[in-house]
Image: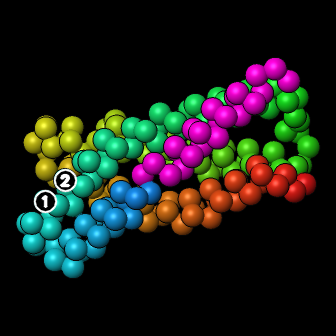
Amino acid sequence: MPWYLQVKFVHLFMVAMWSFSTAVAYRNFIIPAFRAWQREPDNTAAMARRNEFMERFDKGAILEHAAFPITLLSGLLMVWLAGWSWQDLNWLSMKLGIVLIIFVPIEIVDYYISHLGGNKRKIRATGDSARYEAMTRFHWQFFRVTTPLIIVFVPLVFYLAVTKPV
């Protein structure tokens, strides 16, 4: 399998970048900022901190969002190079199912709210404070829904990839 190990290296590096690049910022900045704002929703300093951290988080998510498509492409390239079948019910089909059903939809929404129509810095520049607040709250709800999924399914995908149990 020429190039397989090189592609696997790229794949693993991109998976690590995708899955862990925003974890520290989320845990140590986003969560405390939102909780402080929720305790005191009329506190302008808490709201300003929440907004600043969200805008910085959107910008920081560029690493995650650059790594995800490379992860997908390198994974598919590994399947092709190794000649694996995804038609059988095995570790690969389970892993690809999780990626397609859980991760791809999450990332599509995440791309939108971080870089496209939901980017808080771009919305702030338009002066549309109602949309800014709506997208900030939507992003927080998105985190609350997707974080448990990420906590469960990222380690599961790692487990399937490493142990290849079935």
Q: Which amino acid does label 1 sit on?
A: Ala
**Which residue reaches farthest bottom?**
39
Q: Please say which color scheme the image uses.
A: rainbow
State the SS at label 2: helix
Residue 3: image quadrant is top right
For the residues bearing labels 2 and 1, Cβ distance under 8 angstroms: yes
Give the CA distance from mark 2 to mark 1. 6 Å
* Residue occupying the point 13% across, 38% down: 125
Please name the residue that numbered disc 2 is placed on: 52
Residue 127: image quadrant is top left
* Residue in the foreground of this view, choosing between 99 and 70: 70
Confirm whether residue 100 shows in the render: yes
Q: Main secondary structure of the magenta part?
A: helix
* Label 2 Cα neighbours within 10 Å, binned few <14 / some 14-19 / many ≥20: some
Q: In which quarter of the image is the N terminus?
A: top right
* Residue in the foreground of this view, choosing between 159 and 119: 159
Confirm whether residue 72 shows in the render: no
* Residue occupying the point 70% across, 53% down: 157
Q: What stretch is highlighted in magenta?
A: 1-22
* Residue occupying the point 73% across, 44% down: 96
The total number of labels drawn is 2
Q: In which quarter of the image is the C terminus?
A: bottom right
In the rendered image, the vertical position of residue 128 relative to residue 6, given as above or below: below
Residue 34 position in % (x across, y down):
27, 67
Residue 116 position in % (x across, y down):
34, 35
Mark carried by residue 48: 1
